[in-house]
Image (cartoon, rainbow, N blue to C red):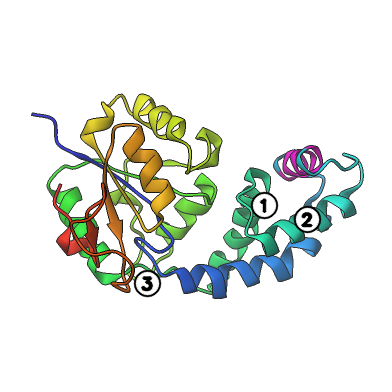
Amino acid sequence: MTLPIVLTDIEGTTSSISFVKDVLFPYARERLPGWVRAHAADPGVRQSIELTALEAGTNPGDDEAAIAALLRWIDEDRKATPLKALQGMVWAEGYAAKAFVAHVYPDALAQLRAWHAANHPIHVYSSGSIAAQQLYFGHTEAGDLRELFSGYFDTTVGSKRENTSYRRIADAIAAAPGDIVFLSDIEAELDAAHAAGMRTWWLRRDGAGVAPGTGPHPVVRDFHAIKL
């Protein structure tokens, strides 16, 4: 018998939206311009700058135009892959300096540990880069949680609102979509995962909006109510 595989979002699902919005994003926005200028010759940074220029339609050699585009994307909360990569690099320095530690809801932590102990593979799918995801779970209030996860996915597999992205994830982990349970607080993401054949659970931590038992996605307020 195949054990169900868990695929989880981070922001609003395992962790507080406010930590990401009020701590991580402002930290990166304040430091990103100077950090990009200081590290522009680094190969990974250079690649992200050039990808930013390509996506923004600016001159690849004009780093200031790329920086302006990156700041605009932060303000728009745009899920641009080069932005997410650079944010992750800036956050790495913040974690190393102990400027902050990542938030994880106690119910999510307890259930993730229980699923891991029961040998359910757990994967992460977030708009943040894979490096940023690993940093996040490596520096939480509860310590290093990376041992709980079997793998990570970001927007390099596609948008979280497109069903093809979830099919790619299923292919990558050699699993049938029906054996994967996707957890998120965003209905459009759940719709896409459901269309790809995955089972879904909708985290509504404020309890508002949708009554439990309605629609294709069972609605829960915390991880304890999720049944694999």
Query: In this orientation, which residue lies closer to the viewer: 173 or 92?
Result: 173
Looking at the image, is mark 3 or mark 2 earlier in the sequence?
Answer: 2
Q: Main secondary structure of the magenta part?
A: helix
Q: Nearer the viewer, mark 1 or mark 3?
A: 1
- Asked if disc 1 and disc 3 are in contact, CB closer than 8 Å, the reply is no
The number of discs equals: 3
Is 126 on the left-hand or right-hand side of 70?
left
Q: Residues within 10 Å of mark 3 (few under 14, many from 20)?
A: some
Query: Where does the image place residue 223, in percent across and percent down from the top left?
Result: 22, 61
Kindly identify the residue that appears in the image at 53 percent across and 73 percent down.
Answer: 98
The vertical placement of 209 against 198, above or below, is: below
Separation of residues labelled 1 and 2 (CA atoms): 8 Å
Amino acid beneath label 1:
Leu
Quadrant where the image shows the N terminus: top left
Amino acid beneath label 3:
Glu
- Asked if disc 1 and disc 2 are in contact, CB closer than 8 Å, the reply is yes
Separation of residues labelled 3 and 2 (CA atoms): 28 Å
Kindly identify the residue that appears in the image at 32 percent across and 41 percent down.
Answer: 150
Q: Which residue is mark 3?
A: 141
- Asked if disc 3 and disc 2 are in contact, CB closer than 8 Å, the reply is no
Is 1 on the left-hand or right-hand side of 216?
left
What secondary structure is found at the residue carrying circle 2?
helix
Looking at the rendering, the stretch of residues picked out in magenta corresponds to 45-54
The vertical placement of 159 against 17, above or below, is: above
